[in-house]
Image (cartoon, rainbow, N blue to C red):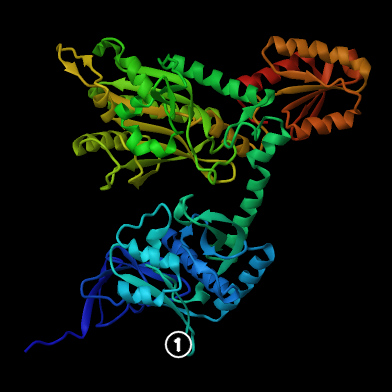
Amino acid sequence: MSTVSSELRVTLDGSERVVPAGATAGQALEADGRTVIAARVNGELRDLEHVLGDGDAVEPVEIGSDDGRAIMRHSAAHVMAQAVQELFPEAKLGIGPPVENGFYYDFDVAEPFTPDDLKRIEKRMREIVKQDQRFSRRPVSDEDAREELADEPYKLELIGLKGSAGSEDGANVEVGAGELTIYDNLDAKSGELRWKDLCRGPHLPSTRVIPAFKLMRTGGAYWRGSEKNPQLQRIYGTAWESREKQDEYLRLLEEAEKRDHRRLGAELDLFSFPPELGSGLPVFHPKGGIIRKVMEDYMRQRQMEAGYEFVNTPHLTKSSLFEISGHLPYYGEDMFPPFEVDGTDYRVKPMNCPMHNLIFRARGRSYRELPLRFCEFGSVYRYEKSGVVHGLTRVRGMTQDDSHIYTTKEQMGDEIKSLLNFVLSVLRDFGLSEFHLELSTRDDSDKFIGEAADWEEATEALRQAALESGLELVDDPGGAAFYGPKISVQAKDAIGRTWQLSTIQLDFNQPKRFGLEYQAADGTRQTPAMIHRALFGSIERFMGVLIEHYAGAMPPWLAPVQVVGIPIGDAHVPHLEKVAERLRGRGVRIEVDASADRMQKKIRNAQKQKIPFMLLAGDDDVAKDAVSFRYRNGEQKNGVSIDEAVEEIVKAVEDRVQV
């Protein structure tokens, strides 16, 4: 005769504990639901009401953790969708996932949402939160789900995707490979159903556990990210574990808006996007051109010192080149369409690596030449969807400071370590100092080429180099390029935002596809390893990042105009022209403002243009062969000799200081 045990043994934070049979994760944790809002059970995120089994390992999920924030924001998205359908009963539900710093939900509605609509929706959300509605998970069969959601056409489509929904469009938050589940929002007192949605979960115990949220904006979004599908209306919101955290985030957004490189680019006359050219195709004005040239000149010098050799390749090529490289099947949607010339399909190039392979292959190579480091400021063109094009940081036409390094397998480990140090050194010279690394690797999907053993060897080489750097290393499973794993350098800017900048990719596949060989010391023919390196990512994007990092106040060595001479009166212009001549002779970019404006307006103009140094001159300065030295922050020194002023400015430029 068998008996059913009335107790379970579970592991809580590494310690074994006995709990009653039928206990939930929340009961086992004995947690306050306003702090601990979910659990990891055997490594999987679960609701607190999840019933435990014998031997389960349970860990608490706090609301301020990464997992906790994602669960809270997903729950806030459900509250928003409930509010929308209560206020707009004809609205059809799309998808509502958590995203970085917030959440969104897509709706099919007859008219776009207005700012007044958002106020009404947010007010209704607050009422739902106060009602303390309980989130309750309920497994359903496919057939039952279709019956319950018969009036939700987009949900019906998702049910048909069960097991094949991807993360790219957020569909996997609702349907996965296992059973379907519906979350009911239940009245706290009566248990009456208030609202329901197809969702995998997990969710908060109740709506009242959402501490702080705010609706931000609306926009159009194609269903599941495809332009072939209907356009829905998307509402974005943010949610945080405390009012203080939310206020801090909103202050950061306000500061980020002040630093927006698109606005500063127009105010400082750096670049523009003429509509006649097309979306994502910038032109650089003279001042922006100076910043760009300084960046390129610096990189040319650093690369020459590091043993790189400059090459140059055309902007277009036969399409067949990308069949050899393997890009067409995996990257074709990101390329501009082909065009026919003399019966042959051509494309503008989206990357430089296939052409660099042809240069390597142009003649026989010896092991004595390796490592062989090719570099190029190569213009490339990528078909970014119109919805993601964003100023200089997401463009369709860009110039990469691209390098491809060919090494023996024995050399590649040391080369990667040296290259990573080189990359970090360059980024520090541009004023960035806080970094972590991300290692993007292969997963089990079919979007990668090559042998598993090659991938393992390449991944381990990158991992070792990253670990030896001493920087934090974050894994990114499935994020590799189709041909090889990569390290990406993630840099924090002045207001704490993280930007992906330099990338280092190790590739054993393209050398094989192109038949690249070198003669080894023993006379055999060997295939080199290939390292792809983009230091800036693209010059355009890196410039946008720097403009925002410095809020447009570029350090003297990068500033388009480094010094402006401001005469008190017309009689003082010749004195400042003499100073300007000396500074130009030392390579300093200086202008003398000889306009009819009063001196105070000239100073304001220089401040608006964020010019690092102002040299003022009046009668006393002319008599003493001196200037009044004014800094961008408003500080001023009077009676500075011309010799001293010239040397201070030249040193600030050479030392790449920030003033």
Estimate how packed mark 1 is, as few (under 14), some (14 to 19) or many (20 or more) residues with alpha carbons within 10 Å. Answer: few
Decide if residue 62 is in sight here.
Answer: no
Decide if residue 492 is in sight here.
Answer: yes
Question: 143 or 453, which lies in front?
Answer: 143
Residue 134 falls left or right of residue 30: right
- Residue topped by disc 1: 191
Q: Where is residue 273 in the image (x, y as percent from the top left)?
A: 64, 34
Q: Give the quarter of the image for residue 334.
A: top left
Residue 643 falls left or right of residue 536: right
Give the amino acid type for the residue marked by disc 1 in the picture: Gly
Residue 226 to residue 301: above or below: below
Q: Residue at x 55, y 18 (%)?
A: 297
Q: Give the quarter of the image for residue 527.
A: top left
SS class, disc 1: loop
Residue 11 to residue 652: above or below: below
Question: 127 or 610, which lies in front?
Answer: 127
Question: 344 or 619, which lies in front?
Answer: 344
